[in-house]
């Protein structure tokens, strides 16, 4: 008898048994590799606890493209203690966490824009400037900024922590005036220069251990500044650090996050490399729609108004600390020069001055909480393993799993999602592809069922 030239396909039960055995073999493989020796894993990192060893093991070792710096530059800038082990303050309700996130040991770095993202308005719409103008203590300015923080910040941070992620925080803000100071005295532009290790790629990197503007200005080596100009520069730095400290307080971090200041378009990949962070684990939360085509950017609605209760707290604080009746005329004129939508001081029809903060007319929309790129790539597309019709309930469960990452979608994200751009677009397309595949499988199974009944 002549043997067939093609192997006869195995029955479904035989193929099913082979699949199960293969799965069990791969699950048991790591155990066999560990017997009699050190653990063997492609991503394992052996590093000391604390200091550079901790930094390299937890941040650099996650991706083969990342290697330790040959010098000590920027090592102190990495957010060493901004993890879920930090001091926990009273928490608002966390946002929904997609089931696909679950799992320990995966890092996420939240790179946060300040103005109109984490912070109300553009640098607080001059509210902090007004306090400084009237010589209020820096502690008062810091207290103001704690009241201007976007409620979505803590909710988003908690969502990642509750999902089992190790969360780092970096502040990344575009404030040209801090990098290239434009003098209001001599009307010239001065490229500031501080400690050499704080400058890279046209950006300023302030480490976590900077406590005040005095700490920063003590390293100044740029062109000479007049006394009034020095005062102006320090006031800008104090407001920046006040916003940083407000973020630190709101998230209950053990130490302040590093702050990156740029005068140009933000470059998330370059900034992450300078901080020794794996680029693939970074997510930049920003309201700037010009960044919508950039990988790793999560667009959010600009915070240009405040919810009723928060708005009332800010206005009460300003009137208590700085009654409008006590304002200098020069300050009043300065505040009234702002654009109408950014004015913090208003006059009624009778000419009476009041502090002004717009009130949100709609509930504050939550931020999206997508997974970083490696976690997205690691999630396999679900495929049917049999020719049987999937129960409707099981099918609904699969679809429900992939609806979570797109919850709380901000209108600012819609263009990116529709065009399949950026990280949000990637997740949206993935969910759509899985849904389409499942629907095709259901159609095929239904067609087979109809054919079998003829």
Image (tube, rainbow, N blue to C red):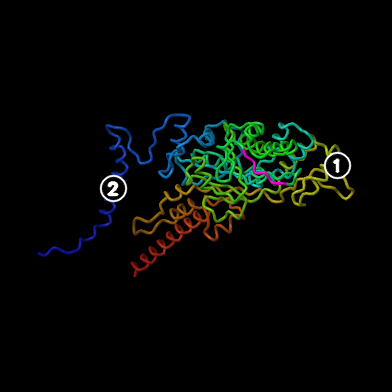
Q: Residue at x 61, y 32 (%)?
A: 210
- For the residue pair 442 and 177, the one nearer the viewer reads as 177
The magenta stretch spans which residues?
188-193
Q: Point out the image quarter for the N terminus.
A: bottom left
As drawn, which residue projects farthest toward the front?
224
Label 1 Cα neighbours within 10 Å, binned few <14 / some 14-19 / many ≥20: few
Q: Earlier in the sequence, mark 1 or mark 2?
A: 2
How far across and down, in percent of the image, does residue 267 sit?
55, 49
Residue 131 in the magenta stretch? The answer is no
**Which numbered dot is residue 43?**
none
Q: Is residue 438 left or right of residue 122?
A: left
Q: Position of residue 205 (x, y in %)?
A: 58, 39
Q: Residue furthest bottom?
A: 454
- Front of the two marks 1 and 2: 1
SS class, disc 1: helix
* Camera-side residue of 192 and 119: 192
Q: Quadrant of residue 322?
A: top right
- Looking at the rendered structure, the secondary structure element under dot 2 is helix
Q: Which residue is mark 1?
A: 329
What distance separates the C-alpha of mark 1 from that of mark 2? 80 Å
Residue that mark 2 sits on: 22
The answer to which of 254 and 103 lies nearer the viewer is 254
Work out whether residue 150 can be spotted: no
The reply, left or right, for residue 410 in relation to residue 385 is right
**Label 1 close to label 2 by CB (< 8 Å):** no
The image quadrant of residue 105 is top left
Please state the horizontal and vertical placement of residue 256, each as a whole percent of the image.
59, 34
Residue 398 appears in the rendering: yes
Q: Does the magenta run of residues contain 190?
A: yes
Spot occupied by residue 130 in the image (x, y as percentages of width and height): 77, 39
Where, by quadrant of the figure, is residue 236 drawn? top right
**Residue at 24% across, 57% down:** 10
């Amino acid at each position: 008898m002549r043997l067939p030239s093609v192997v006869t396909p195995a029955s479904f039960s035989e193929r099913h048994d082979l699949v199960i055995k293969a799965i069990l073999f791969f699950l048991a493989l790591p155990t066999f590799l560990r017997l009699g020796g050190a653990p063997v894993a492609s991503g394992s990192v052996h590093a000391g606890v604390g200091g550079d060893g901790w930094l390299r093991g937890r941040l650099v070792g996650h991706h083969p493209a990342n290697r330790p710096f040959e010098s000590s530059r920027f090592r102190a800038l990495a957010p060493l203690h901004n993890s879920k082990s930090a001091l926990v303050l009273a928490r608002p309700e966390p946002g929904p966490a997609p089931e696909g996130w679950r799992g320990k040991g995966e890092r996420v770095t939240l790179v946060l824009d300040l103005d109109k993202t984490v912070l109300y308005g553009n640098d607080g719409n001059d509210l902090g400037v007004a306090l400084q103008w009237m010589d209020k203590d820096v502690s008062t300015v810091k207290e103001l900024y704690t009241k201007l923080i976007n409620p979505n910040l803590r909710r988003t941070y908690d969502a990642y922590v509750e999902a089992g992620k190790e969360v780092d925080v970096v502040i990344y803000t575009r404030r040209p005036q801090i990098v290239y100071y434009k003098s209001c005295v001599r009307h010239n532009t001065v490229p500031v220069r501080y400690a050499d290790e704080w400058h890279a790629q046209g950006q300023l990197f302030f480490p976590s251990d900077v406590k005040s503007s005095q700490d920063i200005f003590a390293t100044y080596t740029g062109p000479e500044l007049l006394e009034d100009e020095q005062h102006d520069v320090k006031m800008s730095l104090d407001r920046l650090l006040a916003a940083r400290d407000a973020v630190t307080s709101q998230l209950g971090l053990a130490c302040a996050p590093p702050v990156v200041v740029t005068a140009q378009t933000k470059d998330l990949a370059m900034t992450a490399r300078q901080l020794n962070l794996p680029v693939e684990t970074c997510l930049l939360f920003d309201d700037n729609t010009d960044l919508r085509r950039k990988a790793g950017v999560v667009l959010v609605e600009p915070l240009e108004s405040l919810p009723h209760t928060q708005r009332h707290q800010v206005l009460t604080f300003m009137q208590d600390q700085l009654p409008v009746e006590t304002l200098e005329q020069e300050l009043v004129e300065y505040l009234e020069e702002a654009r109408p939508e950014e004015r913090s001081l208003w006059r009624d029809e009778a000419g009476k001055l009041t502090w002004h903060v717009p009130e949100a007319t709609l509930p504050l929309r939550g931020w999206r909480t997508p997974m970083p790129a490696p976690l997205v790539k690691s999630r396999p597309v679900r495929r049917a393993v049999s020719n049987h019709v999937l129960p409707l309930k099981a099918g609904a469960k699969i679809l429900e799993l992939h609806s979570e990452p797109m919850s709380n979608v901000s209108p600012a994200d819609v263009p990116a999602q529709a065009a399949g751009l950026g990280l949000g677009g990637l997740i949206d397309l993935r969910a759509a592809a899985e849904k389409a595949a499942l629907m095709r499988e259901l159609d095929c199974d239904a067609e087979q069922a109809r054919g079998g009944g003829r």
